[in-house]
Amino acid sequence: MADPDPSPATPGAYPGVVEPEREYRIDAGGVQIAVHEWGSESADPLFCVHGGFDFARTYDVFAPKLAEAGWRVIAWDQRGHGDSEHAALYSWDGDLRDAMAVMDSVTDRPAPVIGHSKGGSLMIQLADAQPFRFSHLVNLDGIPYKRRIPDASEHERTRMAASEITGWLDHRRRTATAERKPGTLEELARRRGRMNPRLSFEWLCHLVSVGAFEREDGWRWKIDPSMRFGGFGPWRPEWTITRLPGLPMPFLGILGREQEEMGWGTLPHHVYPYLPPGGRCEVLDDVGHFVHIEQPDLVAGMVLEFLAARS
């Protein structure tokens, strides 16, 4: 749990953090995407995809553990996040195209992919559409679910898309010149702690030190100010879980039992009926949405065992 009365932070001091060994940018349809790598460049690639309002450096403790086991771990900042370029517009499909651009820049062979939260949901959709890219898929608390899954007719889907796009464009116009609210490093960490109450203050300060920038008036998160929660559209979270049964690659889902504001609210019994053949869903007690941050050793061990057993 977060420290209720924390002391001043020291950037970069969080135990277990290993900075990426390589950082570079690739062009994804005119948008510069920042890529971060851990491990030998000659090792087999393993991709890690971060969640919404996060960035690749949230893997600073988890990714090195996979690299130590012999993998070349590649993570990227989604457009508008971290060190990637801000774009005129954002969409679920844009994030998918960026993911394909990063993967294509690294390998043309199937590779294991780990996705957390929104990143996990993105990868379910990509694995369903282009399974040849995936040797294995690991989903870290990233399986959206709603109890009622509507069967909308084609013309209703068109209306849903039009409504989403209109709201999305209106918001983008209003925020075109906005800036994120500044504060001290500790203040930004405390703000983030309201949404991530189970993560330590020291870890949240590390996130600020790598996910924000400092000006004379204070620190600001790097994330594009035009971005908002739920601004994926046109998309519905319940469209994701119905793709699971058709996935042909080995699948491992890892859920945290403790529910948090940034999580999907998905419970184990929601997932079990949709698992693909041979797929697994493991549940971690007393762990929240950020399973790989709360329990990096445990989750890394589960992932490595899964990859070794299903290779």
Image (cartoon, rainbow, N blue to C red):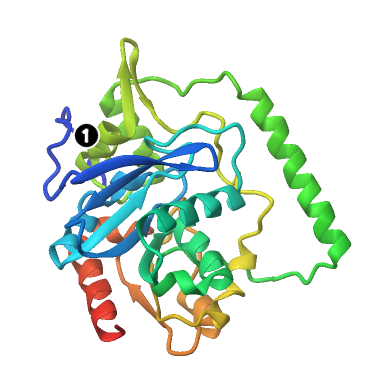
Query: The C terminus is located in which quarter?
Result: bottom left
Residue at the image position 39 percent from the left and 70 percent from the top: 109
Instruction: State the image coordinates of residue 156 (x, y, percent, origin top left).
Output: 85, 60
Residue that numbered label 1 is attached to: 5
Q: Residue furthest right?
A: 155
* 253 shown above or below 49: below
| Residue 122 appearing in the image | yes
Q: Residue at x 27, y 26 (%)?
A: 185
The quarter holding residue 141 reads bottom left
Q: Position of residue 72 (x, y in %)?
A: 23, 60
Q: Residues within 10 Å of mark 1 (few under 14, many from 20)?
A: few
Q: Left or right? Give the position of 134 relative to 5.
A: right
Depth check, front residue: 109 or 308: 109
Which three-letter amino acid code belongs to the residue tagged 1? Answer: Asp
Please say whether residue 258 is visible from this viewpoint: no
Measured as percent of width and height from the top left, residue 130 is found at 54, 70
Figure quadrant of residue 292: bottom left
> Residue drawn at (29%, 63%), measured in percent from left and top?
45
Residue 105: percent from left, percent from top: 39, 53
